[in-house]
Amino acid sequence: MKRIFSGVQPTGNLHLGNYLGAIRNWVRLQDDYEDCIFCVVDLHAITVWQDPAALTKATREVAAAFIAAGINPEKAVLFNQSQVPAHAQLAWVFNCVARMGWLNRMTQFKEKAGKNRENVSVGLYAYPNLMAADILAYKATHVPVGEDQKQHLELTRDIAIKFNNDFGKEVFPITEPLIFGEGTRVMSLRDGTKKMSKSDPSDYSRITLVDDADAIAQKIRKAKTDPEPLPETVEGLEGRPEAANLINIYAALSDRTRAEVMGEMGGKAFSEFKTLLTDLAVSVLAPMTTRMNELLADQAELDAILRRGAERANEIASPILDEVYDAVGFLRP
């Protein structure tokens, strides 16, 4: 049986890159795979300090965004990670399976820790093991990932292989990546060489899923461009990162290839193209924002959705954790 797992951290407002690179693809996967598990990974969020009230709020916002984007909590399993103990329990086992050298090679840790490697939390260093536990607690066979997450999935595969070899049992599958096409890597509106990020100090670097039509229009209008009109071919975007980024966004929002968009937009001034991009972005994102606000207005129901999802997730993960504990040799009742 094929099983999908993926998750998003509840840290700040989700942005256009999160939607185009991940959430939109998850919605489509519901129709292709019978077994989809989507998670708000709040355990990952606390690898750096979080204000508790803000974390609670952000967890609800991310869950609401999932549903507003089209995730059906009656069809897919939707929950927040901390409600399912198997994630943390399996992560400890994997802490004892993974090797220090493997974690030392993780480029994202180096980027996030910067010059303060000695002062960051142990959780930030070891969180790839928790990511592996997120996936393998459900024996997920496929994980939709961006290019920047491929290294972590490779670690998950290494852990699964080593666990199976160490204990002489084929407990875990060797999970495969699902990598999608154009628009999966959305860049900053202020710098086309940097990925769109929640942590960028400029709010104008990103379009968030709670932006209204006026905010979307203003951010696209202020998006960095270059003085030349749009080229007529994809090859003409070479060396023009801001132009390439806006074309990628338009192509993704309209479900078209870059070549198709270039055939239509080639030769246009950025002022004209930005108007068209604004209209498209508002038409796609505004209904989601409205639905998010409706969901967030009824916190009790939103919390109940996450609780029901966690119950379903526990039903899947508990027997798998039992299988792991038996393989390791833990004495249990």
Image (tube, grey):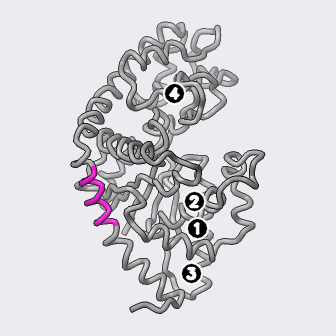
Tell me which label, 3 or 2, sits earlier in the chain. Answer: 2
Residue 258: percent from left, percent from top: 51, 28
Which residue is pictured at 50% across the width and 41% down the height? 181
* CA distance for labels 3 and 4: 42 Å
Q: Nearer the viewer, residue 201 or 232?
A: 201
Q: Quadrant of the C terminus?
A: bottom left
> How far across and how far down the image is residue 99, in percent?
70, 71
Mark-to-mark CA distance, 3 and 1: 11 Å
Labels 2 and 4: the sequence-earlier one: 2
Label 2, on which residue? 153
The label number, if any, that marks residue 90 in the structure image: none
For residue 164, the mark is 3
The N terminus: image quadrant: bottom left
- Residue 157, numbered label: 1
Within 10 Å of disc 4 (Cα), the crowding (few <14, some 14-19, many 20+) is many
- In space, the residues marked 2 and 4 are separated at their CA atoms by 27 Å
Examine the image and state in which quarter residue 291 appears.
Answer: top left
| Cα–Cα gap, marks 2 and 1 | 6 Å
Q: Which residue is mark 4?
A: 206
Name the amino acid, label 2: Leu
Tell me which residue sits at (42%, 45%) in the image. 53
